[in-house]
Image: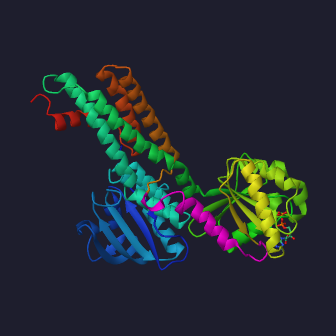
Amino acid sequence: MFENDTICGVATGLGKSAIGMIRVSGPSAISICDGIFVGKKKLSEMGTFTAAYGKVVDGDKAIDEAIMLVMKAPHTYTTEDTVEIDLHGGSYVVRRVMQLLIERGVRPAEPGEFTKRAFLGGRIDMVEAEAVMDVINAETERSLDTSVKQLSGKLSKEIRELREIILHNTAYIESALDDPENYSLDGFSEELSKELTQVKQRIERLLSTADEGRIIREGISTAIVGRPNVGKSSLLNQLLGEERAIVTEIEGTTRDTLEEYVDIGGVLLKLIDTAGIRNTEDVVEKIGVDKAREVIETADLVLLLVDGATGLEQEDRDIINNLGGKRVIALINKSDISTDAENEARAQEIRSLLAGIGIEDITIVMTSAKTGQGLDELKSQIRDMFYSDKIDYNNQIYITRARHRAGLITALEGLERVQDSIDQNMGEDFLTIDLMAAYAALGEIIGETLEDDLADKIFSDFCMGK
Ligand code: GDP
């Protein structure tokens, strides 16, 4: 499994910075760095976690002053010998030293390869490795928070506990089958059934966070809908403001559909936009009910705009009729030019229309996409909707990856088969197959395979052959 070459990577940004740091990891890290370094001591003679000041040299030619930090296997991030080279910032020097290392046989690291080595070296499990990637990629504070939690191993710990229960029961069955004099299976099925119910509930709880987890990582997919001229593009521009983050084109969908991300105080919104919405000239042609329907379908949250000043028209009603089953916030826009009485009348009408399609719990905000009035209220409503009311954010572990979700589902299915077998009074040896399938599926989430777990367990817990 272990890779034997030595890799290097620039650990700091490549722009101008005070310090540029290159990390070198692998079996030859120390000897190769010794070859390009002149200091008081040889790096190979230094203790682990000690630093030396000196010069990086290419033959006789000094390139830059440097501090070399030597860290010896196995107590390093990658578990391999590692040298960190601190240079003066500036991309030229950093590149030059990278080049020098490469000439001496060090390979430039693939993205994430240091972390991959940490995983292969057994220092972190798969969930933690993925969390490191997420920390690096985190778009907002909240998603950072979740990644940090996974990094600290909360999800891994939960998975390990569940596996432990499954393994214990499997080992007990195996022991009892081998050694019926000492281990009785009387009443075991009922006990197992009870424990499985709890394990299944815990898996289901994890699964129920999968949607929120996705939302935290990818943003709340948000559609802004309304008939032409209600102020959709104005709202979009207000929301994007200076906070505009990333613009990506979605492959395979209409060419003119864009996703734009905006961070509203720690919650990432993925605004589903169509080029037409932003071009006021084309609005009438492009944005009709059909377009709205298409966008609504993929949205986690719909911002329904109506014009407070002119009131609702048939087209508004048509759009509203497509909102069934969605989380909706209604915005009575242009409230800067509509009266309170008008706003109240619009709110009433929206409430009754939405109630007509089964949406009772409706949030209505008065906004002006022109003056920005009401937008803070809107943002705080969105935050509340997703974090404080619906979910207890701070104590929950979130499932943020499809791979984890798939593993949990497979495990759950396995356990359901075990329950079926119990219900049909199948023999205990039969149960172990599905128990182990569930165990393996959970193990895949944290990157652990079956190995000798069961044998170890049987020997350690049940003292076979005593
Ligand atoms: P869209 O067709 O829904 O995208 O609407 P636009 O954002 O293009 O807005 C249509 C017109 O309404 C533009 O002239 C905007 O300046 C104006 N508008 C949008 N929002 C407001 C608002 O809150 N108050 C006022 N007074 N005008 C607005």
Q: Looking at the picture, does residue 25 appear above or below residue 406? A: below
Magenta segment main secondary structure:
helix
Compared across the picture, whether 393 is left or right of 371 comes to: left
The stretch drawn in magenta includes residue 161: no
| Quadrant position of ligand 1 | bottom right
Residue 162 image position (x, y, % from top left): 34, 43
Nearer to the camera, 129 or 392: 392
Tally the numbered discs. Answer: 0
| Quadrant in which the N terminus is drawn | top left
Q: Quadrant of the C terminus?
A: top left
Q: Report the residue at 77% width, 61% height from top.
A: 348
Q: Left of 369 or right of it: where is 211?
A: left
Which stretch did the figure color magenta? Answer: 368-395
Q: From this viewpoint, which residue is outermost toward the left?
A: 466
Looking at the image, which residue is at 39% across and 44% down? Answer: 447
Visible in this render: residue 307?
A: yes
| Direction from residue 264 to residue 152 in the image, left or right | left
Taking 140 as reference, is 461 above or below it?
A: above
